[in-house]
Amino acid sequence: MNLRSTQTRVGILIIALSLGSLAAVVRAAEKPPAPPAADEEFFIVSSVDLPKDQLVLKRPTEVTQLIAVSDKTVIRNEEGKTIQLKSLRAGDTVYVTFAPGTERPLLATRIRKAPMTVEELHRRYVPFQ
């Protein structure tokens, strides 16, 4: 192996390590998902009925809830960007805020697609002793 090929390999290794470090810094700087608001309820999407603008959502207790969606309902993804109802799929986890005083089906004012974190799971469902 000659000196030039060794220097080239070392240079490539340094560049690769630098890019890997840069990627780690960028990931660390990304904004973590917003914590759920107090008025949001957690659900798992069971089904999406686009023609009727409705969702069947499932609580962690396996109880289902029919939810209506209007053109005023704000639906956001994990990055906080507005998405359409058709972007939601069965199995997605969502946090929903309802319009006060609505009859059945409840009307969603805000739907936020986001995972259930361990911290949020403990805060909502596991009382500390």
Image (spheres, rainbow, N blue to C red):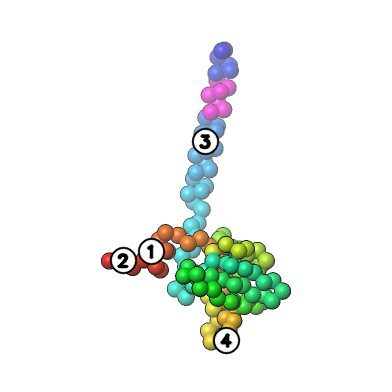
Helix, strand or loop for disc 3: helix
Cα gap from disc 4 to disc 1, whole angstroms = 31 Å
Ranked by sequence position, the earlier of labels 2 and 1 is: 1
Q: Which amino acid, by three-letter code, is at mark 4?
A: Glu
Does residue 18 show up magenta in the picture? no
Residue 95 seen in this snapshot: no
Between marks 2 and 3 in the image, the one whose residue lies nearer the viewer: 2
The residue furthest left is: 129
Q: Is residue 65 above or below residue 3?
A: below
Kind of residue sitting beneath label 3: Ser
* Image spot of residue 19 (x, y percent): 54, 37
**87 versus 96 height, above or below:** above
Q: Earlier in the sequence, mark 4 or mark 1?
A: 4
Which mark identifies residue 122? 1
Give the distance between the C-alpha atoms of the residues marked 2 and 1, in whole angstroms. Answer: 8 Å
| Residue at (51% x, 48% y) in the render | 27
Is the residue under label 4 in contact with that under label 3 (CB below 8 Å)? no
> Where 21 sits versus 52, above or below?
above
Location of mark 3 (residue): 18
| Residue 108: % across, % down | 58, 77
Instruction: Give yes or no for contact between labels 4 and 1 (Cβ–Cβ under 8 Å).
Output: no
Q: Mark 2 near mark 4, Cβ–Cβ under 8 Å?
A: no
Q: Amino acid at mark 2?
A: Phe
Instruction: Please report the bounds of the magenta region as a residue range.
Output: 7-13
- Name the residue at 59% across, 81% down: 105
Mark number for residue 128? 2
Q: Secondary structure at mark 4?
A: loop
